[in-house]
Amino acid sequence: MDDDVVELAHQMFDMARQGDAVPLLALVDQGAPVDLRGADGNSLLMLAAYHDHPQLVEALASRGADVDLLNDRGQSPLAGAAFKGYTEVARVLLKAGANPDLGDPSGRAAAHFFGREDITALLEDSTGEGPGQA
């Protein structure tokens, strides 16, 4: 693979981690793979979710990113959000159709294990709205 392409991919992963949406989404809109994965299998959406960037997660999902794409350890973006306690990211993923029972551990299992009551409540409502929300 061309060194420039590899460098661009590394930059895209950094953008996802940092929530640098404008340049990342511009690259995706110009044809970069929305489900680009790094050496560890983490996708752009996984990195955005794991670093608490719900707006970027939503934008990537709206561009066709797979919200259930597991990394090489069998972890889903929803499980990562549950592990970190990022309720808004979990809400966005659920609204985009994330499966709470996918992966090892699943998002549901991670939320329960780490005592993420807000996320557990979201998981009980398949729309991702949670109790008392519209």
Image (tube, rainbow, N blue to C red):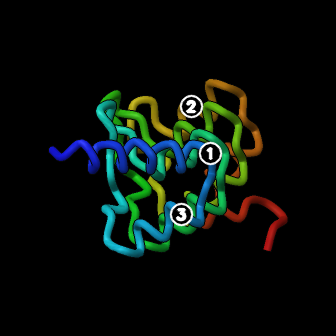
Q: In which quarter of the image is the N terminus?
A: top left
Q: How many marks?
A: 3
Direction left: furthest residue: 1
* For marks 2 and 3 on the same chain, the one whose residue lies earlier in the sequence: 3
Circles 2 and 3 in contact, beta carbons < 8 Å: no
For numbered disc 2, what is the local secondary structure? helix
**Which residue lies at the image location 65% right of the left edge and 56% below the top edge?**
54
Q: Name the residue under label 1.
A: 18
Label 3 secondary element: helix
Q: Can residue 94 be seen in this view?
A: no
Percent x, y for residue 103? Answer: 38, 38
Q: Quadrant of residue 37?
A: top left
The CA distance from mark 2 to mark 3 is 32 Å
Which residue position holds label 3?
A: 23
Q: Position of residue 60 (x, y in %)?
A: 49, 64
Q: Is residue 112 above or below residue 7?
A: above
Q: Name the residue under label 2.
A: 110
Q: Looking at the image, which residue is at 56% across and 48% down?
A: 48
Q: Work out which residue is located at the far right of the displayed protein and give it.
A: 132
Q: How crowded is mark 2: few (under 14 residues within 10 Å), some or many (20 or more)?
A: many
Q: Nearer the viewer, residue 7 or 34?
A: 7
> Which residue appears at 62% of the width and 38% of the height?
82
